[in-house]
Amino acid sequence: MNDAEPDMPPKFNASKLNPLQLRTLALLQELARDPRTSTPVESGGEALITLIPQPHGNHVHIGRRVASVKDASGLWNEAVWNALARKGLAVPNFPVAIRLTAEGLAYDTRMREKVLHGSDH
């Protein structure tokens, strides 16, 4: 018998991502929402991110918002991409593209508002 209640939300950070991985996944999820940086994958509810933005001074543009380069450093870190792959959240082709799985798109990082800020220009 399963003791878990069926309508309980998933446990926060069930994949035990570290803070850099959580921040990076939050930014990748935002990139996946933007048609300028990603393409939906027809089968499986996934998204292929084909444009990883480059830093602009001390920040990076993520859609209509910005993130500090410090918070976004995982976007250019192959080890972070590979960690997300090991957890089943992404399929990387570093440094060209990364596909977020349905699990990666739905993962609650609780980081979106912490790392994304209104655009300064």
Image (cartoon, rainbow, N blue to C red):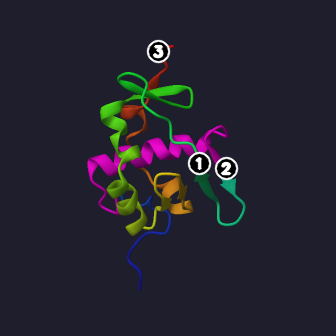
* Residues tagged 3 and 1 counted as in contact (Cβ below 8 A): no
Question: How far apart are labels 3 and 1 at the CA level?
Answer: 24 Å
Identify the residue at the far left of this view: 18
Residue in the image at 50% along x and 26% along y:
65
Foreground residue among 87 and 108: 87
Is residue 48 at least partly visible in the picture? yes
- Residue 24 magenta-drawn? yes
Is residue 109 at least partly visible in the picture? no
Amino acid type, callout 3: Asp
| Residue labelled with disc 1 | 50
Residue range in magenta is 13-38
Residue in the image at 60% along x and 54% along y:
48
| Residue labelled with disc 2 | 39
Question: How far apart are labels 2 and 1 at the CA level?
Answer: 8 Å
Secondary structure under tag 3 reads: loop
Amino acid type, callout 1: Thr
* Residues tagged 2 and 1 counted as in contact (Cβ below 8 A): yes
Amino acid type, callout 2: Thr
Q: Establish if 102 lies above or below 33.
A: below
Q: Earlier in the sequence, mark 3 or mark 1?
A: 1
In this rendering, position of residue 43 left or right of residue 99: right
**x and y percent of residue 57 in the render?**
38, 21
Secondary structure under tag 2 reads: strand
| Residue labelled with disc 3 | 120
Foreground residue among 81 and 64: 81
Q: Establish if 104 lies above or below 66.
A: below
Residue in the image at 33% along x and 36% along y:
71
Packing grade of label 2 (10 A; few <14, some 14-19, many >=20) is: some
Packing grade of label 3 (10 A; few <14, some 14-19, many >=20) is: few
Identify the residue at the far front of this view: 95
**x and y percent of residue 117 in the render?**
43, 25
